[in-house]
Image (tube, grey):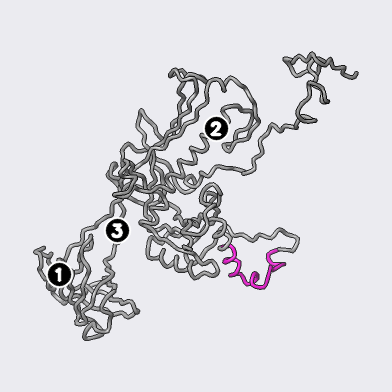
Amino acid sequence: MAIAPTFGSIVPSQSQQLLQSNYLQFNDGTNDFAQQYLPEIYEQEVERYGNRTLSGFLRMVGAEMPMTSDQVIWSEQNRLHVAYDGCTNDGANGIGIQVGAGVVNVISPGQTIVLLDPAGLELKAVVTQSNPTNGDLLVAPYTAATTAALADTGLKIFVYGSEFSKGSQTTNWSGVAGNINTLGENISIDPTFTQFSNSPVIIRSNYTINGSDMAQIGWVEVATEDGTSGYLWYLKAESETRLRFEDYLEMSVVEGELAAVGSAATTAGFKGTQGLFAAIADRGNVETNLDTTNLTDFDNILKNLDTQGAIEENMLFLDRGTSLGIDDMLAGVSAGAQGGTAYGLFENSEEMALNLGFSGFRRGSYDFYKTDWKYLNDASTRGAIDGVSTIEGVLVPAGTSTVYDQILGTNIRRPFLHVRYRASQTEDRRMKSWLTGSAGGAFTSSLDAMDVNFLSERCLVVQAANNFVLFKGAAV
């Protein structure tokens, strides 16, 4: 049965029913729409940027632990053996250690040392006199009359043992300033440590919707990055505000910067916090313009890791360009890849999907696990930067480190990267959210709106940063 509309007396229906009284005609009459046909409306949002969240990096490599203070302090062990760089040579068996700024001379007479100069020449000698005050040594080379063959500056020396005559006796150095030690006097070495600290920053955000808009129900079917899906109205924006804030929790401790003395931030009363990039640049290793055409630069990184903690397992978090460059570098090592794709090996065939990427590799005694870091690829963050000193990735050691905890008074093991947030028995500031206003279930003020508040107070602890590597692009 066809509908016979009664034009001129259109009455809206309270339910979705096909009635004569609520039919709209589409001609040149007075009830026309501005267009011939009603638009087809898709209720479901199109996820054109995929998963838009950026957090997850710290969950993979670190942990979160509470603290109660405005500052977190930790101590890291110094090196075990005695060595000095930048020493001088007078050519007549006199070696000068550059003391000062935390550098003291602890080499005793009778200890045997290796002297290395920048040209690669070396000489072994026994120390006959040592001045702890100014760092002067008098040595007796084993294979030469003097130290004249070595360079005058830039020497490296390290202790490898000692030699004493029969029936000799050692005594502790008296500690008198300027005293020149003689054979038999020994400088006692007390273990030292280096102390580091960081301070948390308060991160805040909020979302506000007025009471009138809350009364207008407009449903939209959505799928959010936190795994939920369904129909939302005004809380859709609140959900995205929460997701954005959770990203800020990670981004703030990755990009964080301490306010320098005399800076505008310090003048305005801000202190900042040392993030991951700043900590590695300050206390770690920086590789600029990594050459992925061969293994030379990577081998140099391995040699540097040998001089540090020599941690066997490491993770590489890279941007897309560097990740593909390493894939090409590893593929070039394979003989089959030199002249093209090799078929028939390991049950491979031309009909199989060819895997041109590598998720990990082993070089020397080190294992590396490679993954793309979305934060470095996303166009809304560092993915849009190309050229001047861009961050191309980081090398993060796996496992834990041993440090001295000032509060517990003992050595503890912690992940190299971990977040500390302010918390106590009555106040947990890891991730706070609360409602204020007079709408949406909140009845705290006369404000005709619902205000959703978010707050956190946290900082990142980067322990043993000398084992980290920051990959930066070349300046243009």
CA gap between label 1 and label 2 equals 68 Å
Q: Which residue shows up at 82% across the image and 16% down it?
A: 7
Identify which residue, 88 or 451, lies in the foreground: 451
Q: Secondary structure at mark 2?
A: helix
Q: Which residue shows up at 41% across the image and 36% down it?
A: 456
Q: Quick check: 277 above or below 231?
A: below
Comes first in the chain, label 1 or label 2: 1
Classify the position of the N terminus by image quarter. top right
Q: Residues within 10 Å of mark 2 (few under 14, many from 20)?
A: some
Residue type at mark 3: give it.
Answer: Asn
Q: Position of residue 51 (x, y in %)?
A: 59, 43
Q: Position of residue 35 (x, y in %)?
A: 77, 30
Residue highlighted by disc 1: 131
Q: Residues within 10 Å of mark 1 (few under 14, many from 20)?
A: many
Residue type at mark 1: give it.
Answer: Asn
Magenta stretch, residue numbers: 326-347
Residue 41, label in figure = none
Figure quadrant of residue 333: bottom right
Identify which residue, 435 or 134, lies in the foreground: 435
Q: Which residue shows up at 23% across the image and 63% down it?
A: 103
Number of marks:
3
Q: Secondary structure at mark 1?
A: loop
Residue 48 shown left or right of residue 194 in the figure: right
Q: Which residue shows up at 64% across the image and 69% down it?
A: 337
Residue type at mark 2: give it.
Answer: Ser
Q: Main secondary structure of the magenta part?
A: helix
Q: Residues within 10 Å of mark 3 (few under 14, many from 20)?
A: few
Q: Position of residue 81 (x, y in %)?
A: 28, 65
